[in-house]
């Protein structure tokens, strides 16, 4: 029988997050990841799922996502009505990791299905089929949210958040971020260092002129364009300036930061 070798998604740890994830998994506890977009949360979960040998179901939550999208629904197929599991149900049945990205975006009824799964019952009642699924030890629920742009309407209720262990994610320290950007883009590390310095300067404007600072993801994009031969000034503009704002004044201010920093 041939063995499938699944490669481990590259993830550079910045603290004790891998140990915490593993302990949460072994103790059957759900985990909440907090942090800005593009700082490595999804990659971290993919890495840990592979390390723990569990399949991973990732759902990007949005404001139309309902509980039925996660649990499943009856579908008409060739005159028959057949039940189709949603990703959460599949994860529970298979003992997989289920990652709900930006969970606060989802409809309120999603919380109702998560509650019995996130306490010691670890059950998923499927009202529509009459089943009650008991999560096996391999199942783990991981959710993320970005406290930066949550409004009062869209934040996690204490009764929900207090069911999770929580881990705060930030951008990696500069040395580590330069190494990550170099590995991901193929641009030599010494050429990534000034890009990281620029990202830090731009991040300082967060809250004044900008809603969100430059993410590690955007830094990787800029470095990848430069590695592919694009002029650095053009790559920086396309990957690190234009995605941040539509305001001409703010764009000019950001470009000034580029001039001063590089
Ligand atoms: P998030 O889920 O927080 O929005 P991602 O996990 O998608 O962000 O990260 C965006 C990109 O940044 C990844 O595709 C990867 O290239 C890079 N990245 C960020 N942090 C790390 C890290 N610690 N190790 C490896 N890659 C990282």
Image (tube, rainbow, N blue to C red):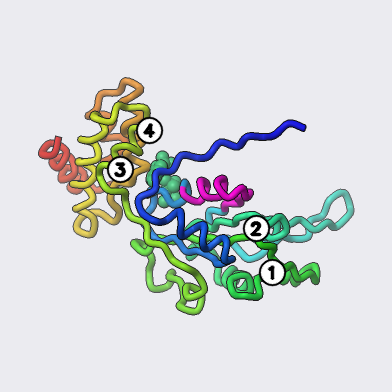
Residue 142 x %, y % = 53, 60
The residue drawn where x is 24% and y is 27% is 232
Compute the Cα span from label 2 to label 4: 31 Å
Q: Are marks 1 and 4 in contact (CB under 8 Å)?
A: no
Residue 11 x %, y % = 43, 43
In the picture of the structure, the residue carrying the numbered disc 2 is: 138
Q: Nearer the viewer, residue 60 or 238?
A: 60
Which mark is first along the chain, 4 or 2? 2
In the picture of the structure, the residue carrying the numbered disc 1 is: 124
**Quarter of the view holding residue 233:** top left
Task: Look at the image and give the residue range highlighted in magenta.
Answer: 44-58
Asked if the residue at label 3 sits under 8 Å from ligand 1, the reply is: yes
Quadrant placement of the C terminus: top left
Which mark is first along the chain, 4 or 3? 3
The residue drawn where x is 14% and y is 42% is 257
In the picture of the structure, the residue carrying the numbered disc 3 is: 176
Asked if the residue at label 4 sits under 8 Å from ligand 1, the reply is: yes
Which quadrant of the render holds ligand 1? top left
Compute the Cα span from label 3 to label 4: 11 Å
């Amino acid at each position: 029988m041939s063995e499938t070798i699944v490669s481990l998604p590259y993830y550079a740890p910045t603290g004790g997050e891998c140990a915490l994830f593993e302990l949460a998994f072994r103790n059957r506890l759900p985990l909440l990841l907090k942090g800005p977009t593009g700082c490595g949360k999804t990659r971290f979960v993919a890495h840990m799922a592979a390390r723990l040998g569990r399949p991973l179901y990732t759902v990007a939550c949005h404001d139309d996502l309902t509980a039925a999208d996660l649990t499943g629904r009856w579908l008409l197929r060739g005159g028959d009505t057949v039940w189709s599991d949603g990703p959460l149900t599949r994860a529970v049945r298979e003992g997989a990791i289920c990652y709900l990205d930006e969970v606060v975006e989802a409809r309120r009824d999603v919380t109702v299905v998560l509650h019995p799964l996130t306490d010691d019952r670890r059950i998923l009642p499927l009202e529509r089929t009459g089943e009650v699924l008991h999560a096996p030890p391999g199942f783990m629920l991981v959710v993320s949210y970005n406290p930066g742009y949550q409004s009062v309407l869209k934040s996690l209720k204490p009764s929900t958040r207090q069911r999770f262990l929580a881990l705060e994610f930030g951008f990696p320290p500069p040395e580590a971020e330069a190494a990550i950007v170099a590995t991901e883009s193929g641009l030599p590390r010494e050429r990534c260092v000034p890009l990281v310095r620029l990202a830090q300067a731009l991040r300082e404007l967060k809250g004044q002129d900008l809603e969100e600072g430059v993410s590690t993801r955007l830094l990787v994009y800029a470095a990848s364009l430069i590695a592919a031969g694009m002029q650095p000034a053009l790559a920086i503009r396309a990957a690190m300036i234009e995605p941040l704002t539509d305001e001409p004044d703010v764009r000019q201010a950001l470009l000034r930061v580029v001039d001063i920093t590089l």
